[in-house]
């Protein structure tokens, strides 16, 4: 493989790997479930994006035509990741998982788990 | 009559087309066999799924949608970097919060699009929607300004965009 292609693929892989690593570190470090939810939904999307881009460049170069499977994976990922996060957050609230004490507006959890508006209508 | 017949064969024409295109992309080929098989799937699957359809808003502006998607993609990259910095920085400094965003848009699809965008973008995850579909509950990883500022940002940046796409 051409040196520059190899360099590009390596940079993308390292970049993607770093972000996936940060997502995992977030899972370990952050203190409550809701905060942990942020790490895998965001940091991981860019990480996977980088890895998929690397795969796309490498395969396109080797086979001589555009490889578009990776674009489809990105599309499905962007559609499914928010849905998973939303359902997880919803379930967490319905089970009254504890949030750390300095979370502001914690009383919204009770309103949200009954799917009521934050204030009663006047 | 002919319109009814067309509807019976293709209850979801856009979905059928999308399914065919994705099938061809998955197989990476344009051979006759794949076009035929893809067309068959694009006919049978919508036919099976049509009863599950929910009424959607009639207007849909594709160019606005493309503009919105590009804007969100840029924001996703920024969100990733921001969250990475927050995650690696001192944990004690984070100020998590729940925020209730009043919704001015209506309809299942626009709200779903807005909630998904909120989850993908800087430091926010959508958590629930109130039963009357007027409030979106959001968890914020690090609330920097006031609650009102964040609500205003979500409303002006994303809700406005969604409203333009669906004209609702």
Image (cartoon, coloured by chain):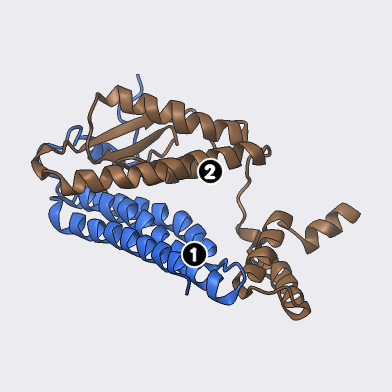
Q: In this orientation, which residue lies closer to the viewer: A17 or B127?
A: A17
Residue that sits furthest to the front in the current view: A3
Left or right: B109, with A14 as reference point: right
Q: Which residue is mark 2?
A: B69
Residue B114, x across and y down, in percent: 46, 40
Q: What is the crowding at mark 2: few (fewer than 14 residues within 10 Å), some, or many (at least 20)?
A: some
Tell which chain the image draws in blue: A
Q: In this orientation, which residue lies closer to the viewer: B150 or A118?
A: B150
- Name the quadrant of the C terminus of chain B: top right
Q: Residue at x 52, y 73 (%)?
A: A59
Can see residue B109?
yes
The residue tagged with tag 2: helix, strand or loop? helix
Left or right: B154, with A60 as reference point: left
Q: Which residue is mark 1?
A: A73
Tell which chain the image draws in brown: B
Q: Is residue A60 above or below residue B168?
A: below
Residue that sits furthest to the right in the current view: B1
- Check the residue under mark 2 and report the chain it is in: B
Can see residue B105?
no
């Amino acid at each position: 493989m051409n040196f520059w292609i190899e360099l590009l693929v390596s940079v993308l892989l390292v970049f993607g790997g770093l972000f996936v690593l940060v997502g995992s570190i977030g899972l370990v470090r952050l203190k409550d479930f809701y905060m942990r939810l942020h790490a895998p939904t965001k940091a991981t999307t860019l990480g996977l994006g980088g890895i998929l881009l690397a795969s796309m460049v490498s395969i396109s170069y080797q086979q001589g035509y555009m490889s578009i499977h990776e674009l489809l994976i990105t599309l499905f990922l962007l559609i499914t990741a928010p849905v998973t996060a939303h359902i997880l957050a919803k379930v967490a609230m319905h089970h009254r998982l504890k949030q750390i004490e300095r979370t502001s507006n914690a009383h919204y959890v009770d309103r949200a788990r009954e799917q009521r508006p934050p204030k009663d209508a006047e | 009559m002919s319109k009814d017949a067309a509807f019976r064969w293709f209850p979801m024409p856009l979905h059928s087309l999308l399914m065919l295109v994705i099938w061809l992309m998955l197989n990476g080929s344009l051979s006759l066999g794949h076009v035929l098989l893809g067309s068959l799937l694009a006919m049978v699957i919508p036919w099976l799924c049509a009863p599950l359809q929910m009424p959607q808003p009639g207007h849909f502006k594709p160019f606005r949608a493309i503009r919105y998607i590009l804007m969100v993609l840029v924001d996703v990259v920024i969100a990733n970097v921001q969250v990475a910095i927050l995650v690696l920085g001192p944990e004690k400094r984070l100020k998590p919060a729940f925020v209730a965003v009043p919704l001015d848009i209506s309809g299942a699809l626009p709200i779903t699009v807005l909630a998904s965008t909120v989850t993908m973008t800087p430091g926010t995850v959508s958590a629930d929607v109130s039963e009357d579909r007027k409030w979106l509950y959001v968890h914020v990883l690090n609330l920097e300004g006031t609650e009102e500022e964040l609500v205003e940002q979500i409303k002006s940046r994303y809700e406005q965009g969604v409203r333009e796409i669906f004209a609702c």
